[in-house]
Amino acid sequence: MGITGPDGPVVPQSVQTIESVFMILAQLSIYPVSEGLSMGRFVRKGVKIIEESGYTYQVGGMSTSIEVPTLPDLFELVNKIHQAQLEEGARRLIIELKVDDRRDKDASLAGKIQSVTDKVGE
């Protein structure tokens, strides 16, 4: 799966272009631990909220990576997803959030993927 923006896929699995700006990169996982083994409906709800936000994101097997302009934007998005999970019926949530707020150079999800891809080929 490639990176997805507000208008659909932005960067396919093989990254073709890199659009870098000073962005906060985040990795988010939310686990409704009180809801049994199936979490699909919770994941779908969270991804839909991220999609509606217009931020660039990439769904992974264990987490979702997101580009946002500011920390308040990120926290607002996490709060919306948190509230939606509760409204969906979750009674207990575990939230894991990793934040990369790098200010010395442009950052993007596509750039990070391209950097790894380039180094693997060396």
Image: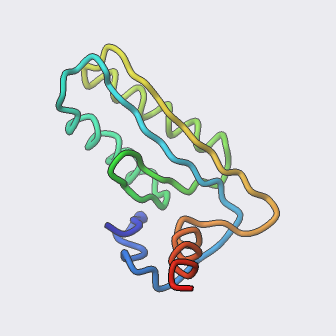
Query: Residue at coordinates 42% horizontally, 73% vertically from top-left?
Result: 10
Task: Report which quarter residue 99 is drawn in.
Answer: top right
Residue with the most extreme right position: 104
Coordinates of residue 7 in the picture (x, y in percent):
37, 69
Viewer-closest of 76 and 20 = 20
Query: Residue at coordinates 36% horizontally, 29% vertically from top-left?
Result: 31
Q: Is residue 65 above or below residue 18?
A: above
Task: Report which quarter residue 4 is drawn in.
Answer: bottom left
Check the picture and name the quadrant holding the C terminus. Answer: bottom right
Q: Check the image and tell me how it is coloured.
A: rainbow
Task: Report which quarter residue 41 is drawn in.
Answer: top left
Coordinates of residue 72 in the picture (x, y in percent):
65, 40
Is residue 113 found left or right of 42 in the rendered image?
A: right
Is residue 91 found left or right of 79 in the rendered image?
A: left
Is residue 8 found left or right of 73 in the rendered image?
A: left
Query: Residue at coordinates 36% horizontally, 55% vertically from top-left?
Result: 59
Residue with the most extreme front position: 122
Q: Is residue 38 above or below residue 35?
A: below
Check the picture and name the quadrant holding the N terminus. Answer: bottom left
Coordinates of residue 49 in the picture (x, y in percent):
37, 44
Across the whole image, how many numbered discs are drawn on residues? 0
Coordinates of residue 52 in the picture (x, y in percent):
39, 51
Query: Residue at coordinates 32% horizontally, 51% vertically from top-left?
Result: 61
